[in-house]
Image (tube, rainbow, N blue to C red):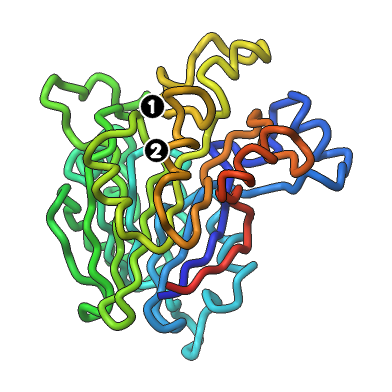
Amino acid sequence: MIIKVLGAAAGGGYPQWNCACPNCERVRAGVPSLRARRNDSLAVSPDGERWALLNASPDICLQTEAYGALHPGPSLRGSPVQAVLLTDAELDHTTGLLQLRQSSSLDVYAPPPVLLALANGFPVSKIVEPYADFRWREARPEESFPLFGGQLAVCPFYLGDKPPRYAWSNRNQDREAWVVGYRITDNTTGGVAVYAPGIEAWSQTLQRHLEGADCILLDGTFWRDDELRLLGVSELRASDMGHLPVAGANGSAERLARIPARRKIYIHVNNTNPMLDERSPERRTVTELGIEVGVDGMEMEV
């Protein structure tokens, strides 16, 4: 299985278009220890010829152009992208579906609440219907499904019940799976990858799905819970936004370090996160724990 990081940044990308925080200002100035990143998205393939996207970011056209394996062909109109797996209904993970409307056919997998949101609150399914044959398929937690004739097996798992702001009125008390991760197994090599860009807490479910994985791409949105407040950006905490911070006694770094995966990578990194700076003490901390910080263009085989 081949995994390509198309974008490693959280919503808004890095630098964010309307942000003048120190990180964004320094990357715009060309500081060598900082690298720009596009919105969070991955591509995965069993053979390098047929591909699935994990989330469809607003940058999807630039992302596919930047990676030759995703270029069209051999016909005049066509794409090796055959499926999209959505982890949630956030705009930064779904607006790229509008760009993919020229596709002749595409399987789109998402949890039931997300499919409902994409039919009503942000009605992508209705908008693209006149343009392309999108087959909307449920990705229910703990119910595995095959991709590419069974070469890959995908198991969605529950991560959180936070809907996007436009669908907040749809939230109920049943802890619906508004946010999922995906555990993907290559049935030929036995390799396992886990993609979880939005974790509310380090749950037993998350722990179980991380165990035995060869490659983990995990939520690295914020360094600390009060990161935005300290910068004067917002009063919201990481936990208010459905993200477990990297640092601290209850953060993800120490726990992730104990998972014996071959590659452990933070993905969906917010523009304010100090570990983006390759010379920062925060970057040194995660590096010493055996964890990488995702960057566009990373490629792994498992």
Q: In the depicted view, which residue is nearer to us: 187 or 208?
A: 208
Mark 1 and mark 2 residues within 8 Å of each other at the beta carbon: yes
- At x 27% / y 34%, what residue is drawn? 203
Badge 1: few (under 14), some or many (20 or more) residues near its Cα, within 10 Å? some
Give the residue displayed 17% in from the left and 65% down from the top: 145
Q: Position of residue 142 (x, y in %)?
A: 14, 51
N-terminal of the two: label 1 or label 2?
2
Residue named by callout 2: 198
Q: CA distance from mark 1 to mark 2?
A: 7 Å
Q: Nearer the viewer, residue 225 or 73?
A: 225
The mark total stands at: 2
- Is 277 situated left or right of 219 in this image? right
Q: Mark 1 = which residue?
A: 242
Residue 263, x across and y down, in percent? 50, 59
What percent of the width, then of the height, locates residue 271? 65, 34
Q: Residue at x 40, y 49 (%)?
A: 259
- Look at label 1 and name its amino acid: Gly
Q: Secondary structure at mark 2?
A: loop
Q: Which quarter of the figure has residue 276?
A: top right
Give SS at disc 1: loop
Q: Point out the image quarter for the C terminus.
A: bottom left
The answer to whether residue 110 is above or below residue 221 is below
Q: Is residue 109 visible?
A: yes
Looking at the image, is 178 positioned above or below residue 296?
A: above
Figure check: 294 above or below 234: below
Q: Which one is in front, 209 or 270?
A: 209
